[in-house]
Image (cartoon, rainbow, N blue to C red):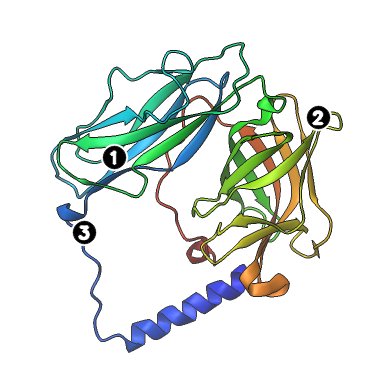
Amino acid sequence: MKRSIIKYFAILSAVLLVSSCEWNPPMFDSADSFIAFTASASAVAEQGGMIGIPVIVTSIAGQPAVSVTFDFDEASAAIEGEDFTLVNSSNTLEYSQGAGYDSIWIQPIDNDIFTGTVPLIINLTSNTQDYAFGVNSSHTLNIIDDEHPLGVWIGTYSVVALSYGNPGPWDESWTVVTSAVPGDSESLSMIINTGNGGGVSFLASFDTEEMTITIGAGTEVGELYGYGPTAMYVGDYATIDIESPVVGTIEADGTIKIDKIAMILTDYGFSGGYWDAFNTTWTLAGKKAVRVYPPVDKFMLQH
């Protein structure tokens, strides 16, 4: 699937190059500057340690320093001093270079009361350069109660996905956010981000006696690669099982391992849409959030 689409784009690029009389590249000026969270939501367990929520200022070089203020929405269920502490010295982020990243640091408070998931809604409110706010001007941090039966496996994961189609060059790195499901103590909601955005929430069931995780065959996981909807099956790139569920193992330290995750671009069918298959290891992210940079189109990087 990857090779055929790469070849298609190479041919299309050549045709466009020949047929175009002139090229007018898009221009970026100071009027296009904006400020936004790098994601609309994240999650952290009560005992998960401090988490950073990145805010990006995008502007051309040479712009003046900018300060960005934020506040906690009154609709938040999370209460400062009871459910979390703001680690930053104030509700203002400073960008001395006029662009770049800074983070809002939140320390969850681990208590002995089971309250379930409590959302903390953070809003960007103003900035000293009157830049526009991007689509993600609000961010919801879900603070997960560690008394939840599946609390060990709730949080943000860094996933190493080893390719079956072309080991090494086609390996991927994902981020997966897991969260509690109201009224369901045996399942978690998950969202996968492969670097292209577009992930949607799906369910995974957990068996803490057998220490397994199960995801239904054909589960829709979102537009993970920018080429339409993606569904998850069992496969090793050479084959695919469209009936069996995807089954992996879970460990007491929160680690998850799932082998033979086959990603299918459903608009192209099973044969033409077989993106790749992966052997994955999921590790709970460290205390400091990883900075997220603009995604790179994987198709354009393959040879």
Q: Is residue 235 visible?
A: no
Residue 108: percent from left, percent from top = 49, 19
Circle 3 is placed at which residue position? Answer: 28
Marks 1 and 2 sit apart, C-alpha to C-alpha, by 43 Å
Q: In front: 290, or 77?
A: 77
Query: Is disc 1 surrounded by few (<14), some (14 to 19) or many (20+) residues within 10 Å?
Result: some
Q: Earlier in the sequence, mark 3 or mark 1?
A: 3
Q: Earlier in the sequence, mark 1 or mark 2?
A: 1
Identify which residue is drawn at 37% across, 40% down: 138
Residue 207 lies left or right of residue 131; in this view the side is right
Residue 39: percent from left, percent from top = 43, 43
Q: Earlier in the sequence, mark 3 or mark 2?
A: 3
Identify which residue is drawn at 72% across, 70% down: 270
Identify which residue is drawn at 29% across, 17% down: 89
Assess whether mark 2 and mark 3 are in contact (beta carbons under 8 angstroms): no
Assess whether mark 1 and mark 3 are in contact (beta carbons under 8 angstroms): no
Numbered tag placed on residue 43 in the rendering: none
Q: Secondary structure at mark 2?
A: loop
